[in-house]
Amino acid sequence: MTPKRFCITGATAGIGRSLCKLLANENVAILAIARSHEKLLALQKQFPSISIFCSDLTLDYKKAAEAIIAFNANVLINNAGVGYYGAFENHTEKELEETLKLKVLAATHLISTLSCYWKKNGQSGVILNVSSVAAFLYYPYFACYSAANRYLLHLSNSLYHELKPFNIYSLCFCPGSVATEFAVKASHGFYKESPQMAMSQEQVAKAILWQIEKKKRYLIYNYKFKFLVYLMRCLPFRLQSYLLKKTIARRLPKI
């Protein structure tokens, strides 16, 4: 069996960093990609076996794709992402572009480049895209993020059967609230996720590695959020939107 060689985007914080830690402790080959060279060096100092590549995927994802191929990765975890709470018309152009470039353009290019390379060379591989439970919901005041993750979910599911005959697996991981700095940035510093309400980064990272091992097409994580998605989809559209709006309202100074 060919040893797994992982590439992880968004590797210096949150879920990405936890994945690097778990895999490095197992002596797995890792290419960590992130925009901060300083944070990448700090990660490599802690885990010397990790290879690093500095790339801002909102600006140039083609060089990142070349680095992944040069590293000979056979597992790609598309983890990089960002989102912002608030009224759609109040988002800056930069916020909208950053959200869409990471979750749509960069992710699509990396998936396309790597899957084409693997097919051409007869290589097997796994691409896991980190989406969100927001992909299953109509989310007022979180519209761009939920729509971008919906795209990533649909792309992953559509490619699953297309690539599977070539022993290439397109998977999608959809977590609920995770104890990272995501909510702080999304709310511009106003809101921080309660550790009691959110899942730990390590817990989520382990679930991702389990999904890759099992090659499960998509996974809503965990059971609480799986039930939430089921419940919301049973509700009338207006009630669902009202309840989701309320969850965002407490994360912003005012809606």
Image: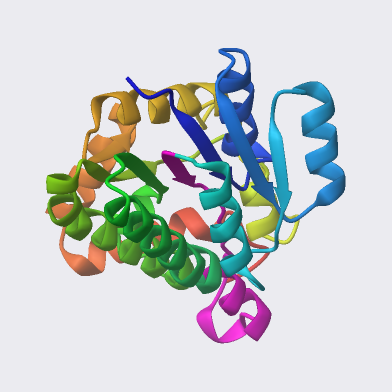
Residue 56 lies in what quarter of the image? bottom right
Residue at (19%, 52%) from the top-left corner? 163
Q: Position of residue 12 (x, y in %)?
A: 71, 40
Which quarter of the rendered picture does the N terminus lie within?
top left
Locate residue 25 relative to residue 109 in the image: left or right. right
Range of magenta residues: 74-99
- Rendered position, 122 above or below 100: above
Is 168 or 155 nearer to us in this picture?
Answer: 168
Q: Is residue 130 magenta?
A: no
At x 25% / y 46%, what residue is drawn?
A: 229
Considering every residue shown, the one lying at the far front of the view is: 121
Would you place residue 2 above or below residue 7 in this image? above
Q: Indicate the position of residue 142 as horizontal and vertical percent values.
A: 47, 66
Q: Nearer the viewer, residue 111 or 70?
A: 70
In the rendered view, does 233 fall on the left or right side of 92? left
Position in image of residue 37 (x %, y %): 83, 50
**Whole-percent x, y for residue 167 in the image:** 20, 41
Where is residue 136, by image quadrant? bottom left
27 to the left or right of 75: right
Q: Quadrant of the C terminus?
A: bottom right
Q: Is residue 82 magenta?
A: yes
What is the image's colouring?
rainbow
Residue 43 visible from this viewpoint: yes
Number of numbered tags placed on the structure image: 0
The reply to whether residue 243 is visible in this rendering is: no
- The residue located at (58%, 66%) in the rendering is 61
Of residues 239 and 173, the one nearer the viewer is 173
